[in-house]
Amino acid sequence: MKQLFEFFEDKPVASVLDIGTGSGDFIDLLAHIFPGAQLIGIDPDGTVLSQARQKLPQENIQFRQMEAQHLGFPGNTFDVIAVSNALHHLPSPEMSFAEMKRVVKPSGWILISELVCDNLTPAQENQKLFHHLRSRIDRLNGIFHRETFSRQEIFGMVTACELTVKHHFEFSQWPQPETRPAELQFWKDKMQTNLKRAEGFAEYEELAARAKLFEQQISESGFQPAINLVILAQK
Ligand SMILES: C[S@@+](CC[C@H](N)C(=O)[O-])C[C@H]1O[C@@H](n2cnc3c(N)ncnc32)[C@H](O)[C@@H]1O
């Protein structure tokens, strides 16, 4: 994401917190953007944190098991707080934003990068269909996972907690849709694996019909991750 390298080029950043860090993909990017900084990634899921620790053993990157809505840090601690593709996993975005605002320094930055659900190409709509079906199956299995938000909803959350948007842009993780049959088969297989987790629920037939629709649609228009909206805000 070259825009982030350019944005932070002239800004001194010594401490970074990554919320919902998962297995560490985004904090890895942050470590490249802020090579001299101390970074902490937090996530409530101990399994993904173990994967992140194995992947990123550098001394300047630490991981802690924690929830966004209860951040165990004093106020005004971090120069940058990032939350990447995790907003729609948070049971209380309001409490989480209040916590981020508390622990970011007065001159610090809150960096949000989140998949959006509106104004997508057909190939991006297919990824949304995949993702929304998976989130529905997660919910059936008792895992908190919303559908993705619209651009307006994300801006609304930022402004509702009185953060000021200073910069924003959009980017696509893959420049072109994937259309190769072997690669599309990977997503079809992944959908079937997800669908298996819905077996035994009353919704199974409806979900299976949507999975079939997904298979048809990716054969017609390919598969491409939805657009990410990136927002840089200050308190
Ligand atoms: C899709 S992953 C995003 C991973 C990473 N940020 C990235 O961009 O690759 C969403 C993560 O949010 C985490 N999560 C779920 N509930 C959370 C909470 N209450 N506080 C912080 N993170 C949470 C999940 O465990 C999961 O690892």
Image (cartoon, rainbow, N blue to C red):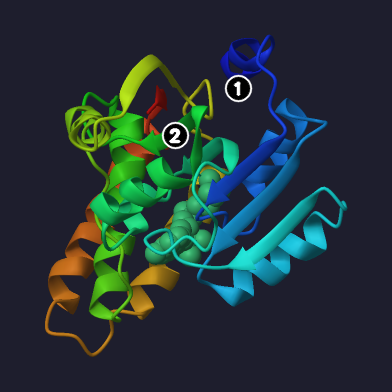
What is the three-letter code of the residue carrying label 1? Met
Are dots 2 and 1 in contact, CB under 8 Å?
yes
Q: Quadrant of residue 79?
A: top right
- Using the image as rendered, state which of residue 213 and residue 103 is in the foreground: 103
Residue 181 horizontal side relative to residue 122, left or right: right
Q: Residues within 10 Å of mark 1 (few under 14, many from 20)?
A: few
Specify whether tag 1 is near ligand 1 (CB below 8 Å): no
Whether residue 26 is visible, yes or no, is no
What is the three-letter code of the residue carrying label 2? Ser
SS category of the residue bearing label 2: strand
Residue topped by disc 1: 1
Q: Quadrant of residue 196?
A: bottom left
Q: Position of residue 136 (x, y in %)?
A: 24, 66
Q: Position of residue 160 (x, y in %)?
A: 18, 35
Query: Image point 21% across, 34% down: which residue?
Result: 150
Q: Position of residue 38 (x, y in %)?
A: 76, 43
Query: Image point 33% across, 46% down: which residue?
Result: 97
Specify whether tag 2 is near ligand 1 (CB below 8 Å): yes
Residue 59 horizontal side relative to residue 9, left or right: right
Residue topped by disc 2: 113
